[in-house]
Amino acid sequence: MGDRRVLLVVSPEVAIFGYDGVVSFASVHDAVDAVPLNNEVCTIIRIGPGVHRQPVHIPKTKNFITLCGSPIKDTVICWDNTTTRIKHTQSSQEIGTGTLNSATVIVEGDDFIAENVIFKNSAPQMSGQAAAVRVMANRCAFYGCRFLGWQETLHLHGGKQFLKNCYIEGNYDFIFGDSTALLEHCHIHCKAAGYITADGRKSSSEATGFVFFKCVITGNGEAAYMYLGRPWEAFGRVVFAETFMDHCIEPVGWHNWDKPENEQTACFYVYRCSGPGSSISEWVPWCKELFGDEAIPFLIQTFIDPDIENPWLVHSLGIQVPVSASSP
């Protein structure tokens, strides 16, 4: 890869009046469109603070893109698609029109990074709300981002993802998909009754799964109304490690999606968790508590970055390795 490229997206208020003297774009997707096909240069799109009301698609042909928001003021990418009403600014032939193609931001390009960006689906609750972000890239990372919505807020579909210092809220399968994802030091907020995760691992041979490491789970009060997860597919795999869980977690912990046969195949694990919602005394018997070395495979860098000789987290993206990989 050569030198990096920097593009500027002005704040929505500035875009109305123009921004003299600086080469800039009025919208995020205009800046993405300006990235050359088959891009091999690290391209940083700096987004001015404010609410950018638009859907954004990072196509497969545009890799090495970073969306960088303001660390001081909110930088929001917001749209209101639902599963039955999908509006795109790009052609439906390019993006598609099904349920899985309705997210506010769709990421298909590899080696994608987002930092200090708020991703939001603003459709009303219970309207068949689509995801705030759908990720289909082979490799991507999110730092200090927020994912706002109700249903299926964050769709991690294929590839490997690393999320650090992020905030994710919702109520119904709001972190879902079939990918290999490590969420570290993230805040998970449960807005109403439902399920935090819906993992789509399809067989015992898949290396996929969601790992929550040193995270915090909060709710709206003292009541227990939230399940840690349910298997979207029979072999769903989720690990909560060294995570704080408040009162919102249901006493049984997990749900079988009303399919008793899932209890024989789902892999739901916990390791050294804390808080009033972490007691396993009433949890379903098919959830396993990990001890000692049993947790190590999920808490080292190779879980999401298995190529030791050519680690994408360090070399391809130029970002910090997970705390779990650097801790003694």
Image (cartoon, rainbow, N blue to C red):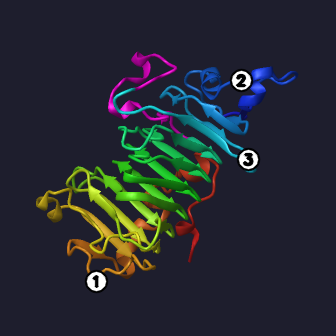
Answer left or right for 259 relative to 238.
Answer: left
Mark sitting on residue 281: 1
Q: Which residue is mark 3?
A: 73
Q: Earlier in the sequence, mark 3 or mark 1?
A: 3
Residue positioned 32% across, 53% down in the render: 198
Whether residue 9 can be seen here: no
Count residues near mark 1 (Cα–Cα under 10 Å), then give few for <14, some for 14-19, many for 20+.
few
- The quarter of the picture where the N terminus appears is top right
Residue stretch rendered in magenta on the structure: 86-111
Q: Is residue 256 shown above or below 140?
A: below
Label 2 sits on a secondary structure element that is loop
| Quarter of the image with the C terminus in it | bottom right
- Towards the viewer: 132 or 289: 132
Inspect the image, locate mark 2, and give the three-letter code of the amino acid beneath it: Phe
Helix, strand or loop at label 1? It is: loop
Residue type at the position of mark 1 = Ser
Q: Which residue is mark 2?
A: 25
As helix, strand or loop, the secondary structure at mark 3 comes to: loop
Residue 125: % across, % down: 41, 44
Left or right of 269, for residue 86: right
320 and 182: which is toward the camera? 182
